[in-house]
Image (tube, rainbow, N blue to C red):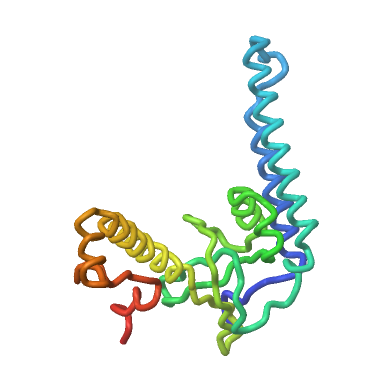
Amino acid sequence: MGFYLYIQKHAYIHIYKAKRVVKMVDLYSDSSDADELVMMDSDVETDSEDEFDIADELEYEIDNIYREDDFHMESTKIDQTYYIGLCNTYLSRNTILFVNSISNRSFFRHPYQNVLTYLKEYSIFHCSRPKIEIMKLNVLPNGTYSALVKTHWLRLIQRHWKKVFARRKLIFRKRRLPGSQLYNQCHGKYPSDLRYLPTIHGMLSNYAT
């Protein structure tokens, strides 16, 4: 089996709980002895309580996502299937590793940032720059879970469609000009530079091999 064999089932839960324990240890290890405690101003104390409230709320939300999505989290992932989740580049072996995923239903039910935090906390790998991607799972012969990132093509489509949409708006605006309307009435068609209205079809033709 590969060195980075994808670990499933309860490994996520244990890792997440361990992280929470480490955070609590760090929190209390920084406190001084009882004799050196200093009474803080009431405003500062209130701000601290607010920060803890926000952290508790986020922690509750992350746990809620897991309870809602635990079936997907612990399920066996299917080779050549598309998933929404995190991946991590393994440069030394030129491989993109499949890190973690979330069901489509849960992804659309929760804010993006909360989903990203959930995927990071329940991940078995550290991602320096985590970003939610659309991935196609590719199980290698040694059992390693690698990923083919498909989100790149969606970004290309969005970028090119913005340009196409801007050109369409420009053509419509020029067609409304009096000169274009008169030309259309006399010839039954618009001027040559306004006849073709670009569409989504063919806008990625420059990527064709």
Examine the rendered structure and indicate whether residue 27 appears above or below residue 84. Answer: above
Above/below status of 35 relative to 208: above
Vertical order, 130 against 58 (above or below): below
Q: Is residue 171 left or right of residue 52?
A: left
Residue at 69% of width from left, 57% of height from top?
A: 15
Q: Specify whether 175 is left or right of 55.
A: left
Residue 94, position in %: x, y?
A: 41, 76
In the picture shown, does residue 65 fall above or below 190?
above
- On the image, the x and y values in percent for residue 183 come to 20, 64
**Disc count in the image?**
0
Q: Could you tell whether 133 is left or right of 51 in the image?
A: left
- In-front residue for pair 84/36: 84
**Residue sitting at the far bottom:** 141
Give the residue at x 48% y 73%: 150
Nearer-the-camera pick, 154 or 199? 199
* Quarter of the picture holding the C terminus: bottom left
Residue 27 image offset from top left, x and y in percent: 66, 34
Query: Quick check: 39 left or right of 163?
Result: right
Residue drawn 41% across the image and 71% down it: 91
User: Outermost residue toward the front?
Assistant: 186
- The picture quadrant where one finds residue 24 is top right
Picture quadrant of residue 41: top right
* Viewport quadrant of the N terminus: bottom right
Q: Is residue 1 visible?
A: no
Residue 206 seen in render: yes
**At 32% across and 83% down in the image, what residue appears?**
208
